[in-house]
Image (tube, helix red, strand yellow):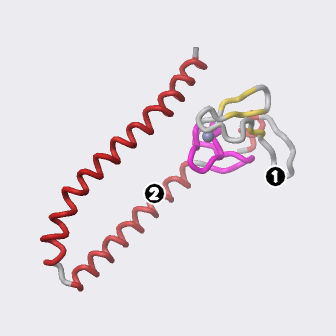
Amino acid sequence: MEYLRDDLQDALKKSIVPGLSAAILASLTVLGREVWSPLVRYVVPAIDTEQLLWLCFLLLLTNMVTAYIALSQRKGKFKAAFGIYWDEQKQPRCPAESCRAPLKLMGSRALACSVCHYDHWIELRKDSGERITLEKAKELL
Ligand SMILES: [Zn+2]
C-alpha cells in the first residue's frame, strides 16, 4: 500500500510541479508586462543616478543577506556522513544536491531515493571504503 502511495506521490510531483511552474511563469510574465511599462515610463526617469546607485546597492545587500541565511539554514539542517546526508533524527537523506529526500532501505545494506532515483542504489561506506549497515551508521553518527 505504501508502495502505491509513493508511486502516486511521484506521479503527482512529475505532473503537477511542471504544470504549476508553467502557470506561475505565465502569470508573472503577464504581470511583469503590466508593471514594467509604467515603471519604465514614469518611475525610472524620476530617479536620479545617485538614487539608482543606492537602490542597486541596497538590492545587492538584501540579496546577499537572504542567500547567506538560506545557505546557513540548509547546511545546518543536514549532516554529511558515509556518503549521504542525515537529518536531525538520524534518518538517511538523499545525497543529490537538489533533492535531500528521505532514503528507503532496500535489502540489508542498500538505500534508494524514490524521488530522484540518485545512482539507483546507495551503499553506506566508511571513509576507509568498508561497507556498513544502516544501524551501524546510525550508531557511529
Ligand atoms: Zn534523491
Measure the alpha-carbon separation of dots 2 and 1: 29 Å
Residue 99 lies in the magenta-colored region: yes
User: What residue sits 23% from the left and 52% below the top?
Assistant: 31
Q: Secondary structure at mark 2?
A: helix
Residue 47: x and y in percent read 17, 79
| The disc label shown at residue 107, or none | none
Figure quadrant of residue 117: top right
Q: Residue furthest top?
A: 1
Figure quadrant of residue 99: top right
Q: Over which residues does the magenta segment extend?
A: 79-101
* Residue marked by disc 1: 127
Left or right of 119, for residue 67: left
Left or right of 114, for residue 105: right
Left or right of 128, for residue 25: left
**Residue type, label 1:** Asp
In the rendered image, the quadrant that contains the N terminus is top right
| The disc label shown at residue 70, or none | 2
